[in-house]
Amino acid sequence: MANFLLEIGLEEMPAQLVTPAINQLVERAADFMKDNRLQYGAIKPFSTPRRLAVLISDVADKADDLTKEVKGPAKKAAFDKEGNYSRAAQGFARGQGLTTDDITFKEFKGNEYIFVTKFEAGKPAAEVLAGMKDVMTSMTFTTTMKWSRHTFEYIRPIRWIVALLDDVVVPFEVLDVKTGRQTRGHRFLGQSVDVANATDYVDDLAKVYVQASADERKANIVSQIDALASENGWRVEKDDDLLEEVNNIVEYPTAFVGKFDPEYLELPDEVLITSMREHQRFFHVVDENGSLLPYFVSVRNGNAEHLDNVIAGNEKVLVARLEDAKFFYHEDQKHDIAFYNDKLNVVSFHAKLGSVASHTQRVKALAAIIGHRVALTDAQQQLARAAEIYKFDLMTGMVGEFDELQGVMGEKYALIFGEEAPVAQAIREHYMPISADGELPASQLGKVLALADKLDSLLTFFAGDMMPSGSNDPYALRRAASGVVNILHDNEWDLPIDAILTDLISEINAEESHFGLPEDVAANLGNVVNDVVSFLTDRVVKALQSQKVRYDIINAVTTGELTDTTQMFKSAVALSAHIDDDNFREGVESLTRVMRLTTKNPTDAAVDSALFENAAESQLYAEASLLEGAEFTTDELLKALLGLQPAIAAYFDETMVMVDDEAVKQNRLASLQSVSNQANKVANFMALDVKSN
């Protein structure tokens, strides 16, 4: 057994790409070892801004031998007219590195075929591991660059490669960089160092001021921050995302405390925290009651030498930021909301879609439609006011300087300018969620306003022929769609998006100005409603896939007549809960038979019970009618539908649907359609795979 070290030395990588990159390297290395039959114990990752490395322990001396049976052409094609092996048989054997002497014949699925047994001896570990070059070069990144005269693209230029099997260099070359044993220490504190043995890697780097393990480095940062907090009686807010970013911009961390003048505490906490966290990568400090204190904690990429100069420099940069914030905070309050709102008329929402002011007018109309649907009757005036002004803060100096604060400053300034608290809260919440799994709006006004804002964006960008394609989504429409789906799902709002958008389109077309939309875009709105609904459905598919829901259940709830995304989730939960029920398979097969028949033979005939010719017809229609008139949860309706199986079986045993008498045929199809109508409220049962149930 041996240990193998691969280190890719790079120019500094963007912090947000380091963790995904090392995770990818570990995954690809594991796949490589498996594909090449080289046994190993574990893979330990190491990463800093300048390196990605894996240490693979307990590597076998050689790859496993491979013995496998390979199937060739059918026996009838194995011989020519003279009884000799045919060209096909000879070519097959030769292609496997064997001769016709190695051919045998075996039966496979009722026919005889040529077979050969192929043996491949395992290669020595060093020879196999030279293939790690392919692991390196096959990695993909969201951001890449070229360097020198190379056409090859990588996350950052490759400067050195260490490849050691115990104490022996595994030779290969990527571009003009050859593998060796020399790694590089901290850019300013360390120097290059030779790694004598793969297992010496961590200790050798520690001597040159590099803490190679990202997990240990992060734990070190947390420990230092906690020590400073304990020493001063503070609580330091260690935001996980910020901690991850800081960890990926340092190789040798040293935490320190800085301060700023308490006079800046007059600014809203969000302004101070944003200035520290987003712009300077500082951790903010609070007292035992959670009140912000005029201190910050930062992490230096280096040791404690000359730390006073580092602290002074960081304080100076922060104060400059806070001075700007203080100036904008007071200047912004010299005007009112109407002043800022009026400026939105000259700000483009998109060149094809008019101004931001026009966007807010459409959102106001759409919010009223949605508010009525969710019975927000007592707050319609507040909703209208929120929709009228919810983008005003985009024109303030503070948001112009700190764009991360849009919505946040809208709430702060709205309260200062005397708006009602629910209106101000909705202004902040309309941006939520800001990521696929982000925090959702808490207030009813915020939920409705967020839905209206996102749905108008989806509708108008689609109508302007600006749908996402592939991975390209410049207007973040997938995030908007996920936000719509998540808000609806979280609140169990069963809203018909197609009907809501159709109502909005009617209002837009009733206005001579089309709410600021160009004529061609306004004319195309009705054509894209189904596309928007399908786009939202795609987000449901992604969400259910992430929850590991069975593929056929996902298909069943997203490929039928359901357009309500919330109902899709409910149906997926219900189906998943009952797939192991004793009557599930037979029930689904019965419903599938009905749905296939009615799908192929649609009818608009009304059911006439006088045309029933047997008791089974009457029984099934009676049971289906009971479902139509009852209030069921999705789970209850599913169980009731599965319970129709005996009645459906009896119906088809006694009844021929496609008879010559047209009136009777249409009546029977209409009767079965009543079953399909109820089934479609749950899922497209035809998409379910019950063969394995």
Image (cartoon, rainbow, N blue to C red):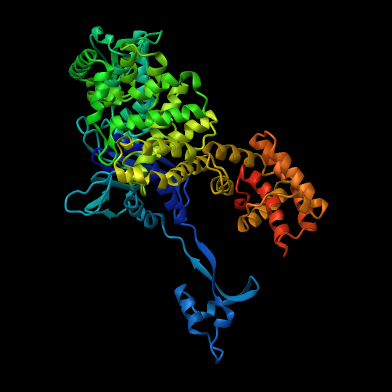
Q: Quadrant of residue 482?
A: top left
What residue occupies the far bottom of the structure in this picture?
A: 82
Question: Looking at this view, is 94 or 671 the one in front?
Answer: 671
Question: Looking at this view, is 621 or 5 the one in front?
Answer: 621
Q: Is residue 272 visible?
A: yes
Q: Quadrant of residue 501?
A: top left
Does 512 appear above or below 619? above
Residue 497's spot in the image, x, y percent?
Answer: 48, 38
Residue 253's spot in the image, x, y percent?
Answer: 29, 25
Residue appearing at x 30%, y 26% in the figure: 404
Q: Quadrant of residue 181?
A: top left
Q: Is residue 299 visible?
A: no
Does 525 appear above or below 651? above
Residue 459's spot in the image, x, y percent?
Answer: 39, 40
Residue appearing at x 75%, y 51% in the figure: 648
Residue 367's spot in the image, x, y percent?
Answer: 42, 28
Question: Looking at this view, is 654 or 302 the one in front?
Answer: 654
Does 242 appear above or below 33? above
Residue appearing at x 37%, y 39% in the figure: 509
